[in-house]
Image: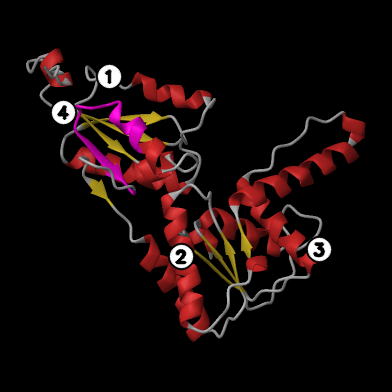
Amino acid sequence: MVKQVKTSREKRGRSQDTRPTIGLLSERLGNEYSYSMWAGVANAAREHEVNLLYFTGGHLNVGDLFNTDFDLVDPEMVDGLVIWSALLGHQVGPEATEAFCKRYRPLPMVSIGLPMEGIPSIMVNNYEGMRDLVAPLVAKHDCRRIAYLSGPEANLETQERYRGYTDALAEHGISLDPNLVIGENEARRLGAMHEYETYTRSMHGKLAMPQMDLYHAYAHTLLARQTVRHVSFDAVVSHDETGVCGASENAVGRDMNHRIRLPHHLLPEAFDSKSRVH
């Protein structure tokens, strides 16, 4: 027998509140990308006279204490969920993300960015979007060496965007150069190494060791490619705005002792880009 779960309105009683309550599961409001999602859902909730609760548990990851925020979701509180699944599963991949979402059944759910069996999903055409982003750099701007800043390998959106990048190159007769591709794991590793070296040189270790965010880690990895491997490029494309923003800012000398040597006509492009990328 399937256990019937009462909705929040049934448990509260219609005399108290006739408005449905929706929960949004996402990351913390720490950047424009997450804030724009929150603002869009909040505006829709306001327009349709729906209560909205924001659960900011962040990326799903073993040992992440912020994930415990998702344990607060209760059928007594909400009538349904909007789950930014593509973002939550950034590190763990689609299977683990789908297993996470199933814990909330039989609540009605909508998935954003990741297809799930039995759950309506709002999808982004990551492959076509990235291919259409790269193609004009070759056809219109004659870029032949396009650096690509990729995301976590387990992420489905990362995989589709990378496929769009490689196919766009192939369609224009450009061979893939692995030296022009930087993955998120490598960026994090080299960024951490740079911060550790800075720490050991400063005040004989009296200062607290700083933590480099991914935003700048991509930029330092690009710098390492140039100085160590002597890799040149005439455009930078990122799987999202995180990488290309760091590259663009540091190219003009912000937050770095050494600038990335980029041509004056460098074209930075990013999937999900905001105005600050340009």
Q: Is residue 92 left or right of residue 110?
A: right
Q: How far apart are marks 1 and 2 (CA)?
A: 39 Å
In the displayed image of the protein, which residue is found farthest to the front? 1
Q: What residue type is labelled 4?
A: Pro
Range shown magenta: 98-113
In front of the other: 89 or 194: 89
Q: In this view, does 241 lie to the left or right of 69?
A: right
Residue 56, above or below 74:
below
Q: Is mark 3 on a helix, strand or loop?
A: helix
Q: Earlier in the sequence, mark 2 or mark 4?
A: 4
Q: Is mark 1 on a helix, strand or loop?
A: loop
Residue beneath label 1, please? 74
Residue beneath label 2, please? 163
Q: Is mark 2 on a helix, strand or loop?
A: helix
* Residue 11 falls in image quadrant: top left
Residue beneath label 4, please? 20
Image point 41% across, 73% down: which residue?
132
Residue beneath label 3, please? 228
Between disc 3 and disc 1, the foreground one is: 3
Image x and y of residue 224, in percent: 76, 59
Q: Distance between the residues labelled 4 and 1?
A: 14 Å
Residue 102 forms part of the magenta stretch: yes
